[in-house]
Amino acid sequence: MPGLVASLLNKIETRRARAGVVGLGYVGLPLAVELAKAGFHTTGIDLDDRKIRAINDGQSYIPDVPTADVRALRKAGKLDATTDFSIVKELDTINICVPTPLRKTKDPDMSYIVSAVESIAEHLHPGLLISLESTTYPGTTDEVVQPLLEAKGLKAGKDFFLAFSPERVDPGNPTFHTRNVPKVVGGVTPDCLKLATALYGTAIETIVPVASTRVAEMVKLLENTFRAVNIGLVNELALMCDRMNIDVWEVVDAARTKPFGFMAFYPGPGLGGHCIPIDPFYLSWKAKQSGFDPRFIELAGHINASMPHYVVEKVGDALNTKRKSINGANILIAGVAYKRDIDDMRESPALDVMGLLHGKGARVSYADPYVPVVHGREWSGRFDINSVEVSRGGFGRYDCIVIVTDHKTFDYDAMVAEADLIVDTRNAIRKPAPHVFKLGAARPETHGEGVAIG
Ligand SMILES: NC(=O)c1ccc[n+]([C@@H]2O[C@H](COP(=O)([O-])OP(=O)(O)OC[C@H]3O[C@@H](n4cnc5c(N)ncnc54)[C@H](O)[C@@H]3O)[C@@H](O)[C@H]2O)c1
């Protein structure tokens, strides 16, 4: 229906379109703020009443979104939020940003997408543009979302418009935000693509249209699989370098001086976050349905998943040099967020490291200025554990400190000066010291003396 296309295009261009964002987390809230800043009256929809109240009170709960922005947009009447999906009747555009985790079996958990789409479908009306942003396997938009929306008789590309545009936001990145990361967009039909491109073009600097929703879905999985596989490769190199007494960090830093054909990835205690540990399994699950066995993804998954065990082995080696065991040792985990200077601890390898050490009898504490509490349900210790404050004068009370996340706020000089032993999984401590054991690096000078028997 060309009239619908022209009318929605005009509403978008003149900012008379009413925008909606479903799922107001790390992806959805920044997007809602950008759409509101672009001039649209934007309504966020979420099931979490606390988030709705926070937004309506002019508060942000996402570190990358300043509260001042939310407050200003509230004051200007451009942003509001609700748990009630009946608002869909009044909206012209909807971006869906709900979670896509894995089930325990490592199969995609589509329940959040299905539930959000079913709620939208109840109020679907002619002329609505819907764009899915959640990371998912190729085929989700046309095999899962489209039939759910069309169940009541309206047709995608004719009565309403459907697109997929992967979110690429990098929480905590000071340079790249929702607005200046190019946005890949695929539509179910050319009109769907045209409208989605027009909408994103109002709030995001560069739009990259692609031929279909499947291409757009695959783009995101290529990006994250590329990272997972390269991290797997460099983690394997770290395990190798450990055996060969070579410093993998020095190797990568020297290799990255090559001005072409190399991109630096660094080893670490394991994958974390909502994307890299999860998304490649969305792809392998779908590929297997086509009879294709994706070997790189599985292999990288094995190596990356083994890293917390290697960290614990390293802790055992370090304690051994002091004739101590993990059992009974006081161990401080420095940093539990999945990466530096953020508060997100979903899938963080710190949870595995803590659980493994606890399982071997260690008394585990942690310090993380961004994560005040780790709840019992989040780690295998099964009890709540609060972050301890550590500062100069306080590092000496542990048998070993394990740097899992290299937050900038830690006082590394004091840590090195006072700690008995440090296991550094991030190369946070650049200067070699006899009590600092680095992941993927030569051991400090031998401390343990073998005892000859007989
Ligand atoms: N966090 C990232 O860095 C990042 C980056 C790129 C892509 N992604 C992808 O974006 C998607 C969202 O991730 P996120 O990190 O923003 O998740 P999040 O958990 O921070 O936010 C998701 C929000 O959706 C809400 N929600 C769940 N079900 C709902 C429903 N049926 N109706 C309405 N709201 C519902 C939740 O309450 C939550 O507030 C995922 O697919 C993720 O893989 C995340």
Image (tube, rainbow, N blue to C red):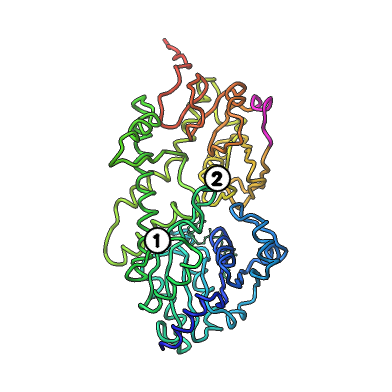
What residue lies at 46% left-to-right and 86% top-to-bottom? 4
Of the numbered discs 1 and 2, the one sitting upstream in the chain is: 1
Q: What's drawn in magenta, residue-wise?
A: 389-397
Percent of width and height locating residue 411: 61, 30
Magenta-span inclusion, residue 396: yes
- Compared with 146, 247 (above or below) is above
- Disc 1, disc 2: CB below 8 Å? no
Magenta-span inclusion, residue 428: no
Residue tagged 1: 282
Quarter residue 263 falls in: top left
- Compared with 82, 263 (above or below) is above
Decide whether the magenta segment is chiefly helix, strand or loop.
Answer: loop
SS class, disc 1: helix
Drawn side of residue 186 relative to residue 89, left or right: left
- Compared with 285, 157 (above or below) is below
Quarter residue 357 falls in: top right
Residue kind at label 1, given as amino acid type: Tyr
Percent of width and height locating residue 397: 66, 26
Residue tagged 2: 351
Percent of width and height locating residue 429: 51, 28
Percent of width and height locating residue 276: 43, 52
Residue kind at label 2, given as amino acid type: Leu
